[in-house]
Image (cartoon, rainbow, N blue to C red):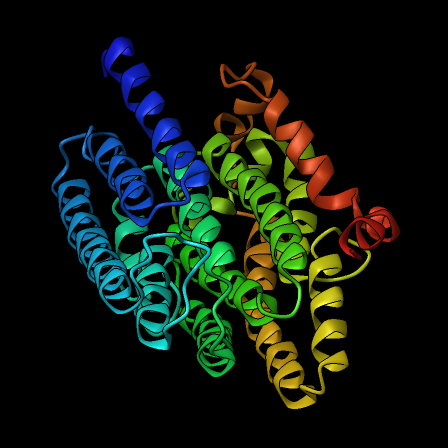
């Protein structure tokens, strides 16, 4: 792709998200979301592969539906209350419709079915943007409206954690596994949203760091299926030994970074007398943990048949930039000791 066009598209992505962040009026927020969608579409379809084009079409249709729902709900809100302000949502009907529209935008279950299909058709770099940056603007809106209907949030959260765990169990494609992992993590964030918005934000940030690291590992190995991971030790032996730690951090095992948000969320749910919800969420994390362990096993405990030509890649220096990978991997593995600082910042 032409670097000037790429720069314009990336600028459009950043501008769309920033407009949504800065807006207090529903029309402006909707405009930011639309800019975001329109800027990423050429990036998604840049390889002109039929699967990429199909994924782009699916993405466009779901995002357009969500944006139309959002616009419809905000007009309904203005009609019922005379308010266009995001913070001044009072009527339960527009709040519920907007919550569902934003759930469709970020891919929460039960409106999640588009996410694995879309992510599977994209290359890893655009997949990374879709899994991280594209979640920011809708999340800013969810945090601002602070949905009052607690039942719908808990149902969305629990369904997402369960579907994210179940959906990934039988997958062999890495991008689909990462999509289901994304659905499960978003479920955890939505569960705790009404009780502690700052904790949701912390979970989102740690999820971004871990996902960024995982995508970069797969990109370095040019891996898209579990079988490809088995040959990764010939390309980058040290990275192969660290990757299971990143994956287990995504699964939420102590003493890794990913344990921190899960621990704090379960603690918060227990404080709110939602012991059953916390138990179901914790059990659903085991489902996700199974397929992370499966990836770790395929990567480090199985050895592909090897010959002399197979061991050459690690002798050749990689052309890819590895500094972002090094920083994000360190953060994905080592940040658990900062939990007291995080909790101190979270408590108002």
Height in image: 90 above or below 41? below
Residue at 31% over, 38% down = 32
Q: Position of residue 279 (x, y in %)?
A: 66, 85
Query: In which quarter of the view is residue 88 placed?
Result: bottom left
Q: Quadrant of the C terminus?
A: bottom right
Q: Is residue 299 visible?
A: yes
The part of the image, by quadrant, that contains residue 31 is top left
Residue that sits furthest to the bottom in the current view: 276
> Viewer-proximal residue, 310 or 193?
193
Q: Determine the residue positioned at 74% across, 60% down.
A: 259
Does residue 83 sit above or below 130 in this rendering?
below
Q: Name the residue at 19% across, 61% down.
A: 72
Q: Is residue 347 above or below residue 283?
A: above
Question: Residue 192, image x and y in percent?
Answer: 61, 69
On the image, the x and y values in percent for residue 103 come to 37, 63
Q: Residue at x 43, y 52 (%)?
A: 141
């Amino acid at each position: 792709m032409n670097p000037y066009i790429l720069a314009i598209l990336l600028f459009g992505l950043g501008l769309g998200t920033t407009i949504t962040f800065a807006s207090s009026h529903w029309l402006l927020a909707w405009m930011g979301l639309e800019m975001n969608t329109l800027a990423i579409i050429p990036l998604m379809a840049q390889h002109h592969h039929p699967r990429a084009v199909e994924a782009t079409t699916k993405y466009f249709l779901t995002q357009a539906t969500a944006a139309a729902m959002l616009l419809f709900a905000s007009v309904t809100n203005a009609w019922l209350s005379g308010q266009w302000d995001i913070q001044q949502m009072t009527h339960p009907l527009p709040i519920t419709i907007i919550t569902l529209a934003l759930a469709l935008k970020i891919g929460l279950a039960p409106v999640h079915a588009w996410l694995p299909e879309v992510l599977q058709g994209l290359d890893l770099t655009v997949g990374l943007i879709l899994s991280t940056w594209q979640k920011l603007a809708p999340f800013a809106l969810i945090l601002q409206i602070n949905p009052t209907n607690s039942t719908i949030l808990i149902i969305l959260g629990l369904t997402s954690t369960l579907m994210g765990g179940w959906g990934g169990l039988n997958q062999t494609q890495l991008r689909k596994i990462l999509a289901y992992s994304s659905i499960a993590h978003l479920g955890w964030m939505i569960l705790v949203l009404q009780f502690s918005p700052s904790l949701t934000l912390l979970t989102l940030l740690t999820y971004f760091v871990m996902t960024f690291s995982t995508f970069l590992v797969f990109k370095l190995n040019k891996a898209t299926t579990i079988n490809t991971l088995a040959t990764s030790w010939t390309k980058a032996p040290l990275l192969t030994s660290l990757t299971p730690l990143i994956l287990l951090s995504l699964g939420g095992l102590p003493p890794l970074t990913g344990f921190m948000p899960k621990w704090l969320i379960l603690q918060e749910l227990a404080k709110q007398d939602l012991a059953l919800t916390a138990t179901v969420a914790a059990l659903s994390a085991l489902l996700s943990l199974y397929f992370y362990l499966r990836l770790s096993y395929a990567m480090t405990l199985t050895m592909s048949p090897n010959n002399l030509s197979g061991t050459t890649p690690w002798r050749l220096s990689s052309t890819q930039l590895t500094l972002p990978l090094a920083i994000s991997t360190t953060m994905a593995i080592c940040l658990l000791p900062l939990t007291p600082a995080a909790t101190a910042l979270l408590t108002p």
